[in-house]
Image: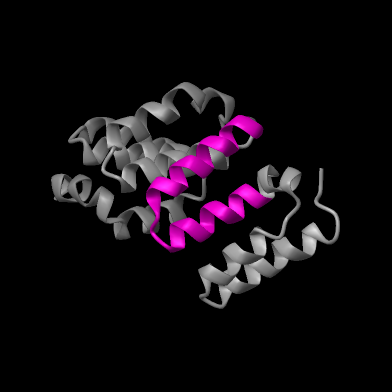
Amino acid sequence: MTLQPPDSHHLLAAVGWLELGNPSEALLELARLSPDNRIHPDALEVAWTIHSNMRDWDRCVEVARELTTVAPELSFGWIHLSYALHELKRTREAYDNLIPVLERFPGDWLMSYNLACYACQMGELKEASRWLAGAMVKGDRKEVTQMAQEDPDLAPLFKEEK
């Protein structure tokens, strides 16, 4: 279900404030949503993005958990939850969050990519390499390769290869 005015306007305004680099105003705009629509998946995704820009990873975990509850069929809730957990140095939990839902999203290259990052950070380099290869098959190989080579989470994997 798509948000209707005026809530759709508040959501767009929140995105606009965020793009202008003002997450505080973006949050104020989200607060103008009707109570029922504050848990709409689009609103939750914007809220997560705002909090991630503020580096408020605890709040990101809360928002992403809500997102996986109201829209478990959307991969980005699960990905956002794991990413926030990883930023909180809870990488094992981030990894364990994605594994059980991976089969629901067989074509999602970003899940495989993130699992590669988490495995690499846990010192599981062979496993990380397998996840990264899977991400390259599911996504654009050239794009994923370039992203991986620039990702500090995967640096140990590339040091191992040299």
Image: magenta residue range: 43-72
Where's residue 77, x and y in %? Answer: 55, 40
Magenta highlight on residue 33: no
Looking at the picture, tell me which residue is in the foreground, 32 or 139: 32
The quarter of the picture where residue 108 lies is top right
Where's residue 42, x and y in %? Answer: 68, 50
Where's residue 12, x and y in %? Answer: 71, 65
Q: Residue at x 70, y 44 (%)?
A: 40
Q: Residue at x 38, y 59 (%)?
A: 55
Residue 137 appears anywhere in the view: no
The quarter of the picture where residue 104 lies is top right
Q: Position of 83 compared to 13: left or right?
A: left
Q: Residue at x 26, y 43 (%)?
A: 89
Q: Residue furthest right?
A: 5
Looking at the picture, tell me which residue is in the foreground, 10 or 143: 10
Looking at the picture, tell me which residue is in the foreground, 8 or 78: 8
